């Protein structure tokens, strides 16, 4: 199961003290008011 492998790898990295900057700059391309209704 891929999810279990990813979770295990994350746990191993976390226990080893690995960190990552997860800061993301988000800029929307379209205002929600201009999108057609689904």
Image: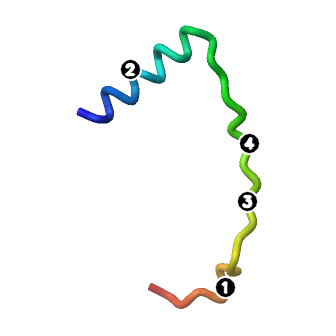
Image coordinates of residue 10 in percent, x first then y, are: 48, 23
Lateral position of residue 4 relative to residue 18, left or right: left
Asked if labels 2 and 1 touch by Cβ distance under 8 angstroms, the answer is: no
Between label 1 and label 2, give the one nearer the viewer: 2
Q: Where is residue 23 in the image (x, y as percent from the top left)?
A: 74, 42
Horizontal placement of 36 versus 1: left or right? right
In primary-sequence order, the first of circles 1 and 2 is: 2
Q: Residue at x 44, y 85 (%)?
A: 38
**Left or right of 23 on screen, residue 16:** left
Q: In this rendering, is residue 34 above or below 26?
A: below
Q: Quadrant of the N terminus?
A: top left
Q: Earlier in the sequence, mark 1 or mark 4?
A: 4
Residue corresponding to mark 1: 33
- Distance between the Cα atoms at labels 4 and 2? 23 Å
> In the figure, 15 relative to 10: above or below?
above
Cα distance in 3D space between marks 1 and 4? 27 Å
Look at the image and name its color scheme.
Answer: rainbow
Q: Which of marks 1 and 3 is nearer the N terminus?
A: 3
The dot on residue 26 is: 3
Label 2 element class: helix
Residue corresponding to mark 2? 8
Alpha carbon distance from label 1 to label 2:
41 Å
């Amino acid at each position: 199961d891929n999810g279990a492998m990813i979770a295990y790898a994350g746990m191993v990295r976390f226990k080893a003290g690995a960190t990552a900057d997860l800061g993301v700059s988000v800029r929307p391309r379209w205002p929600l008011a201009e999108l057609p209704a689904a």
